[in-house]
Amino acid sequence: MIDPAIVGKRITSSTDFTVNQDAITRFCQAIGERDDSIAPPTFSFTFIIAAFEETLKGAGVDWSRMVHGDQRFEIREPIKAGDKLSISSTVESVRSAAGNELVTVRADIEREGQEIIHAWSTLVVRG
């Protein structure tokens, strides 16, 4: 069971993430996107998940039963090759539904101190 006391917990990743063109190109190829001049919105999930794992550490999350339920983005500026990004994540809610536990986590991505993306994911721990 996910500890509901985790709601509000915020972690800022201890290391920045530097985006390289090869990673963007490979991601674009994997999803069938031809334009790799900027990263597609879902590219950010490739490094956000580590921040979510760090934020949820010790909260009773059984990662072997975890599936990705929902995701949405607020994009102020796209991610580009060469960007050095810092990531914070915050647990926004924990709830139960249909025998499953759902946790919503928000990631805030900054480039040079400016917020460029907010990303929300609802993670489902199957019951």
Image (spheres, helix red, strand yellow):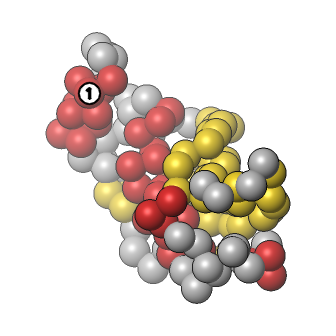
> Do we see residue 86 in this rendering?
no
Q: Is residue 18 left or right of residue 118?
A: left
Write the residue at 53% across / 49% down: 67
22 vs 89: above or below: above
Q: Secondary structure at mark 1?
A: helix
65 vs 59, nearest the viewer = 65
Q: Is residue 39 left or right of residue 92?
A: left
The residue under label 1 is which amino acid type?
A: Ala
17 vs 29: above or below: below
> Residue 28 at what x, y percent from top left?
29, 26
Quadrant of the rendered image containing residue 26 = top left
Q: Is residue 94 left or right of residue 67?
A: right
Q: For the image shown, how many numbered marks are present on the structure?
A: 1
Query: Residue at label 1?
Result: 30
77 vs 52: above or below: above
Write the residue at 58% across / 72% down: 61
